[in-house]
Structures are given as C-alpha cells and as structure tokens.
Image (tube, grey):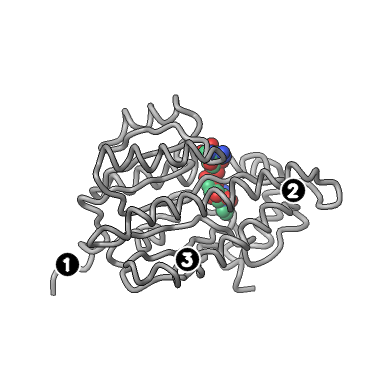
C-alpha cells in the first residue's frame, strides 16, 4: 500500500484563503504552504499579509476587502494570471455582531450578512467558473460555525448566526450544483477557537467560564486543532466528501 498520508499533500495546488491576516486564515495559509501548496493570502491588512508572505514559503499577499465585488474579482483574476489555476478556495473572512437582536441596527445586520455569506457566495461563484474548466476540478471550503446549527445566545450574535446558518445550506446547494464539474464544496463548523475574534471573551472570566461550561471538552480550541479537518477537505484525502459540514467543536453540537 502506498503511503496514505501522501493524499493529504497539496503539491502543485493553488489555494486562495480569505481573512488570512490572523487567526484561522493565517494558520491555514501556513498549513497549506507546509504541505506544498502555493497560497494567495487575502485580507484587508496588507502589512500583516506582507509579513506572513515574507515568513512563509510560497505565500503571496493580495489586499482584498471581501465586501467589495471589485476586490473579489481582482483576487480571483490576479491568482489566475499569476499561477494559471485555482484548486482550493477557503472562504474564511468573517466578522460577528455581538449585540442583542432587539437592539441591532439594520445596517450592522446587513454588514455581517455581506461579509459572512454574500461575499462567500460571490468568491465561490468566481472561483467555480475557473475550476470547472480545469481537469481536476477544485475544492471550496466555507468556514461556518457551530452557530450555523444552533443559536448563540446568551452570547448574542444575530447576524452571525443567520449568516453561518445560510452558509451551511449554501454549502449543500453549491455541492449539488457543482458536483458535475468535479468541484467539491464543504464547510467547517468550529466551536470556540482562541483567535482575535474571541480574544476579549476568552480573556474575560465569565466568557471563558461560559465556553468551558458549554463545551464537553471543557476548553476553547487552539487554532492548529482545525488543521486536520481543513486539510482533509482541501486535499485528495477528501475526494469523496462534498456537501458536508464538519464540526470541530469539542463536542458542542453533540449535546
Ligand atoms: P479573526 O478575527 O482572527 O479572523 C477573521 C479574519 O477575517 C481577519 O483576518 C479579518 O481581517 C478578516 N476579515 C474580516 N472582514 C473582512 C473583509 N471585509 N475583507 C477581508 N477580510 C476580512 O478570527 P477567526 O476566529 O480566525 O475567524 C475566521 C473565521 O472563523 C470566521 O469566518 C469566523 O466566523 C470563523 N469562526 C471562528 C470561531 C472562533 O471561535 N474564533 C468559531 C467559529 C467560526
């Protein structure tokens, strides 16, 4: 039997990762680079991307605000011009709206839906148009959340929960529509992960204790604990997985 770990490698593959300037996106850029991929790291904070690019093999920076249609188009076009293909798209950029639904401004709700759902759709569509012309298709990974399956209150995030729920079912829809093009579309549903998004919550006593109380493994995840699922979905090791959302949540959704 040939080495089964070989199928997890991404040699020669080209991957776009959004929100790569910190947290899960930055970790994923380093992960993909370490198994042979060329990575186009996209985010708004160009200085952070340049640092990541300077420190990591085969990672190039592309400034991109995913709420700008023109930036999304530029990201996909630049990747194609520079590397000739797109094998993996990780829709990871995301924001939350920590506010009670009764008090939320409609503009804030719209903003979260735009970043966490609409931009993911547009980048998936732009990438799929390239992937469908390739012999080897492609893999799209949407970073959703446990709050795509269950509400987040009392850690209120109405727009976030709505967007992530939409992203989970969009994942199923795109998987069905694009299977015939050899494009797999899957999602990850992390539980609480220690990143800039959760900094304040985890640093505060009550927030951290709430996470510990509600997570069967009794702690938030470290960012590297998403590596296994991310690589499975991105690589040929996951070649028969599509339309699926994999929870990496310390048991949250099993309760
Ligand atoms: P993070 O804040 O470190 O990363 C989010 C990234 O998205 C940042 O790089 C940010 O700059 C980028 N971003 C935000 N708006 C953007 C925009 N308009 N254009 C381009 N980039 C933009 O937090 P993270 O935890 O690494 O979050 C990554 C993803 O994981 C998000 O989609 C988040 O919802 C999801 N997630 C996180 C957790 C958690 O507990 N940390 C849990 C479940 C899901």
Give the CA separation, mark 2 to mark 3. 39 Å
Q: Look at the numbered disc 3 and give the secondary structure of its residue.
A: helix
Q: Name the residue under label 3.
A: 174
Classify mark 2: residues with Cα within 10 Å, few (<14), some (14-19) or many (20+): few
Classify mark 1: residues with Cα within 10 Å, few (<14), some (14-19) or many (20+): few
Q: Where is residue 118 in the image (x, y as percent from the top left)?
A: 58, 51
In the rendered view, tell whether residue 251 sits above or below residue 63. below
Q: How many marks?
A: 3
Q: Name the residue under label 2.
A: 206
Q: Does the residue at mark 1 contact the one at mark 3 (Cβ under 8 Å)? A: no
Give the CA separation, mark 1 to mark 2. 46 Å
Viewer-proximal residue among 220 and 65: 65
Q: Is residue 22 left or right of residue 85?
A: right
The label on residue 3 is 1
Q: Where is residue 170 in the image (x, y as percent from the top left)?
A: 54, 64
In the rendered view, tell whether residue 69 sits above or below residue 118. above
């Amino acid at each position: 039997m040939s080495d089964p770990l070989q199928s997890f490698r991404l040699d020669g593959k080209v991957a776009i990762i959004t929100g790569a300037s910190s947290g899960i996106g930055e970790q994923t850029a380093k992960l993909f680079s370490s198994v042979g991929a060329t990575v186009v790291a996209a985010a708004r904070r160009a200085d952070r991307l340049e640092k990541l690019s300077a420190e990591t093999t085969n990672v190039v920076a592309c400034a991109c605000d995913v709420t700008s249609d023109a930036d999304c188009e530029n990201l996909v076009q630049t990747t194609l011009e520079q590397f000739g293909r797109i094998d993996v798209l990780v829709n990871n950029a995301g924001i939350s709206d920590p506010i009670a639904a009764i008090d939320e401004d409609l503009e804030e709700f719209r903003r979260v839906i735009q970043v966490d759902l609409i931009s993911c759709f547009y980048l998936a569509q732009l990438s799929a148009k390239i992937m469908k012309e390739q012999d080897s298709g492609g893999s799209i990974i949407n970073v959703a959340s446990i709050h795509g399956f269950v509400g987040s209150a009392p850690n209120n995030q109405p727009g976030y929960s709505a967007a992530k729920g939409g992203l989970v079912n969009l994942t199923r829809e795109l998987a069905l529509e694009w299977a015939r093009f050899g494009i797999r579309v899957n999602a990850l549903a992390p539980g609480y992960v220690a990143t800039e998004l959760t900094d304040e919550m985890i640093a505060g006593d009550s927030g951290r204790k709430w996470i510990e109380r509600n997570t069967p493994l009794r702690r938030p995840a470290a960012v590297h604990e998403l590596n296994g699922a991310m690589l499975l979905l991105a690589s040929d090791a996951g070649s028969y997985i599509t339309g699926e959302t994999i929870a990496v949540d310390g048991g949250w959704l099993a309760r």
